[in-house]
Amino acid sequence: MEKNKVAFISDLMLAAVALIWGLGFPVTQMAIDAQLSSGLIVALRFLIAAAVMGIIFRREVRTITPRDALLGCVAGLILGMAFLLQVMGQSMTTPSNSAFLTSLNVIIVPFLSWGFFHQRPTRKMLLVALGCLVGALVLTLSPGEGLQLGFGDLLVLCCAVAFSLHISYLGWVAGRIEVKKLTFLQMLTAGCLGGLYNLAFELPQIAEEDFGWMPILYMGLLSTAFAFFAQTYAQKHTSPARAAVILGCEGLLGSIFSVLLGYEPLTVNLVVGGAIIFLSLLVMEVNPAA
């Protein structure tokens, strides 16, 4: 009974993360519209989060071992690359496309977990993954033109692969390092990666930035510091595939927030594709033990 309670709380935490990340897509668009470059957005959000986590968990941070650093930095490198690809892609597509295409990591995670960590997905999980794929295809279909994937959409698809690697890796590493240490190391490494990318490829743009501090603070404190600590904690009590399914709701939520905030119109593709993805994810919560 206690195990079921912990699993339920973990699912609630992951659902809260999905809600925060869903709103994060239009918030990221606010930062992009403020002329913040991709590397700078990633650097600021993760370094702010790392500073907060470093202060709150300073006792644990002082006891980080070389082994801890290796495990945490690998997670941070994967995470930083995923977010760089996502922000660069979103600057060339819509927030809803970015949200839904990012959620395709739900399809990839079960197979990565199966291949690398021998966690075979259930038939229901495979059905959910197939439904999400169909929904994403509907989302990117244009009447009379077929499937329309721009360069920004392709970058977001690459980001989905990176996020799936990150979720699968967290499922493996979560029990091997304390959550607080892992979260701090992820934030610090991802922030440094964004900063290095900014210095290497975006330096001439820094002086021109019009800082949008509200979206940066939202991303740093809620979308990053809180959300990744909650995700890392929750994944100690659930499978990577199940975590991916719940977090996959961020795509639908991101599109809803994007429409409500006026970033794009409500289209038939958005409604139909979103409904297919939502219903597919809902299947996972019917008899969740199956």
Image: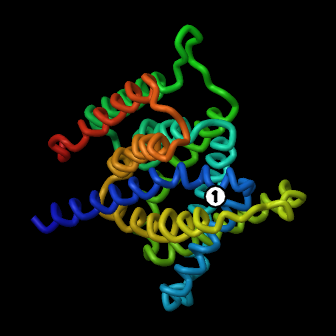
Q: Which residue is mark 1?
A: 80
Q: Residue at x 56, y 61 (%)?
A: 75
Q: Residue at x 65, y 49 (%)?
A: 87
Q: Is residue 237 left or right of residue 100?
A: left
Q: Where's residue 59, x and y in %? A: 50, 91
Q: Secondary structure at mark 1?
A: helix
Displayed quadrant of residue 156? top right
Q: Where's residue 142, x and y in %? A: 55, 17
Q: Amino acid at mark 1?
A: Gly
Q: Is residue 99 above or below residue 21?
A: above
Q: Residue at x 33, y 39 (%)?
A: 121
In this view, the residue farthest toward the right is 204
Displayed quadrant of residue 93? top right
Q: Observer-nearest residue: 74 or 35?
A: 35
Q: Is residue 218 above or below residue 184?
A: above
Q: Where's residue 118, x and y in %? A: 39, 46
Q: Where's residue 148, x and y in %? A: 60, 21
Displayed quadrant of residue 70? bottom right
User: Which quadrant of the rendered structure holds the C terminus?
Assistant: top left
Q: Is residue 171 left or right of residue 218?
A: left
